[in-house]
Image (cartoon, rainbow, N blue to C red):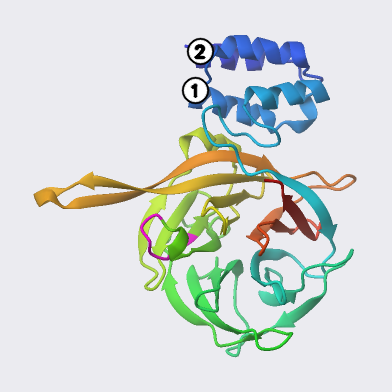
Amino acid sequence: MSVDRLSDAIRRLPRRQVDVSDIRKLQEAAGSKINDDEAALLQKLAREKDRFTADGRAMLEELLGTTGSNAGPGKAKATSFELKGRHEVDIGEPSALAFISPEHGFVVAADDGSALWQVGIPRGKKADATELEPSGGKLKGLEGGAYDADAKTLLLVSEDTREVLQVKVDRGGDELSLGKAERLCKLPALNDEGNKGWEGIAVLPARLSPDGKPHLLAVHEGSPRRIGVLDRKSGEVEALLELPESHKDALEDLSDITVDPRTGHLFILSDRAETILEASLKLNMRGGAAGRARTSWELEGLGTTELPRISGSGRLQPEGLAFDHRGDLWVTSEGGKGLLHLERKD
C-alpha cells in the first residue's frame, strides 16, 4: 500500500535539515494522488517545524496542497491568516475569549481566580483590561466563553462543574455591565479526569446553521476529544462528534472553538499542538422507519493553520480564540504571550 511506502519513507528522513530532495522521495512514495491517510501522515510530519530547510518546508506545504495551512488535495483550503500584532494584557492565565463589539472589545475569562475581564481592541503594544463581576458573584473553574449577539448574552463553561452558564450583557456604556449568571445546562461527564474536561464553547447562529436553527458548540479537551452540538435554547446535547479522520493527528488536545461569522466554519484550537483546525459542520439526512428522515451531524476537515512562533520565548499555550467584526482572528494564551491578532488574508 502507498501509505505503508510513505510511512517507511518518513522514517528514513534525516533528523535535521530535511530538504527538497528528501521531500521528492516522499512524493514518489505517496504517488500521484494523496489519500486521507497519507495526508494525515504528512500533516503530522509538518508539525515538526524545526526539522526542515526553508525550501524543504515550502515543498512539503506544496505537496499538501497549501501555503500556510495543511489542507489536503481536493479539499477547500483553510482560510489564510497572517500575524498582525501581539499585544500585552495584564491578566493571569487567560482561558477563554469572547468578542462583544468594536466599541466594547472582548471579554476574557481567566483561570486564575475565575475572573472576567473586559479587554478593549488594542491600539498599541498593550491592551486595556477592566475586571468585571456578574451580579451573582464570582464564578468557578471558567474555561470557555462566547457571546451570543442575538440574545446579548455571554455563554460560559465551567470545567469544574461542567455547567454552561448564561449572563446578560448590558452594552449601554463604555464599560460592560453583567447580569446574574444563570445555569442553562450541564454537559455530560465523558471521563473522570479533572483536567481533561469541557474547555470551550461557541454560538452557531441560525443564519449559519445547516438546519437553520441556533446551536451551541462545545469542545472536550481529551479522553476523549469531542465536539458537542447542543440545542441553543435547552442545552440538550444533539451529538458528540469525533475529529475528522483526515485531521485527527493534527490536534493533540482541544482547548477552544469559535465560528467564522462569514462562512459558518468551525475553528477548533489545540493548546499543545498550537494549531487551529478549520472544519465544516454538516447535517446528513437518512431514511428512517415509516418514511421518517433521520439526521446526523458530522465534521469535514478543511485544513489546519499553525500559530506563529514568538521568537525568544517558550510555548505559546493558546487557550482561547474569537473572530472580530472584520473577520480577523484573535488568540489568547496562558504562556505570557498576551493577545495575538491574526489578520484575514482572503
Q: Position of residue 309 (x, y in %)?
A: 80, 44
Count how many numbered circles sit on residues in the image: 2
Q: Earlier in the sequence, mark 2 or mark 1?
A: 2
Point out the residue furthest to the front here.
Answer: 346
Region in magenta: 210-217
Q: Secondary structure at mark 2?
A: helix
Q: Secondary structure at mark 1?
A: loop
Which residue is identified by label 1?
Answer: 35
Q: Is residue 102 magenta?
A: no
Q: Amino acid at mark 1?
A: Asn
Residue 1 in view: yes
Q: In front: 235, or 271?
A: 235
Mark 2 vs 1: CB contact within 8 A? yes
Dot 1 surroundings within 10 Å: few (below 14), some, or many (20 or more)? Answer: some
Residue 190 in view: no
Q: Position of residue 72 (x, y in %)?
A: 56, 30
- Residue visible at 47% across and 59% down in the picture: 208
